[in-house]
Amino acid sequence: MIDVIAVGAGGFMGAAGRYLVGRAVVGFWRGDFPLGTFLVNMLGSFALGILVAHPYFAGQLLNGGVRAALGIGFMGSFTTFSTLMYESFILVGRGKPWVGIFYVWLSILTGLLLAWAALCLF
C-alpha cells in the first residue's frame, strides 16, 4: 500500500511540475509548435535515463517507495504521451500536418537520444 501512496505523491508533484513548465513556456512562446509539451517530454526522457542508469539512483536510493514515487509517479505524470498525440492531431486539423508530423518524429527521436545519452553518462 505504501507504493500506491508513493506513486500518488510523485504523480501529484510531476503533474504540478508539468503544469508549471507549460505555463512558463506560454509566457514566451506563441508559435504553432507545442514547445511546452515537447520540453517536459524531453526533460523526462533524460531524467528517467539518469534515474535508471546512475549508480546512486539505481542502487539503494531507488528501492521500494522512492522508486515508485520518482519513476512511476513523478516521471509518469510529468511526461505526457497522450498530450503529444492530441496536439499532433490538433495541428493536422488546423491545416498544419507537417508541423504535426515533425512534432511526433522530433519527440520520438529526441526522446530516445536523450534517454540514451543519460544512460551513457554512467
Image (tube, grey):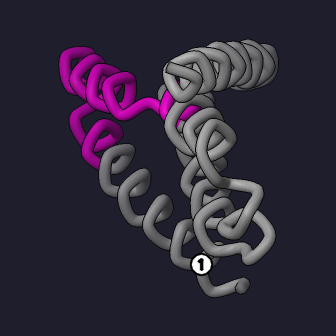
Q: Is residue 21 left or right of residue 33?
A: right
Whole-percent x and y of residue 93? 19, 16
Dot 1: within a 10 Å radius of its alpha carbon, few (fewer than 14), some, or many (20 or more) residues? Answer: some
Residue 119 picture quarter: bottom right
Residue that carries the numbered disc 1 in the rendered image? 119
Name the residue furthest front: 1
Say above or below: 38 vs 115: above
Magenta segment boundaries in residue numbering: 76-101
Q: Position of residue 108 (x, y in %)?
A: 36, 57
Q: Residue at x 66, y 67 (%)?
A: 58
Q: Residue at x 70, y 14 (%)?
A: 16
Mark 1, secondary structure of its residue: helix
Tell me the chief SS of the magenta region: helix
In this rendering, the answer to whether 76 lies above or below 55 is: above
Residue 115, position as x, y percentages in the image = 54, 67
Q: Position of residue 89 (x, y in %)?
A: 22, 23
> In terms of image quadrants, where is residue 19?
top right
Screen quadrant of the C terminus: bottom right
Between residue 88 and residue 67, name the one nearer to us.
67
Left/right of residue 62 with respect to residue 20 in the rendered view: left
Write the residue at 49% across / 26% down: 32
Q: Is residue 96 magenta?
A: yes
Q: How many marks?
A: 1
Q: Is residue 38 above or below residue 57?
A: above
Q: Is residue 19 left or right of residue 73?
A: right
The answer to whether residue 37 is seen in the rendering is no
Kind of residue indicated by mark 1: Leu
Task: Inspect this view and state whether residue 92 appears.
Answer: yes
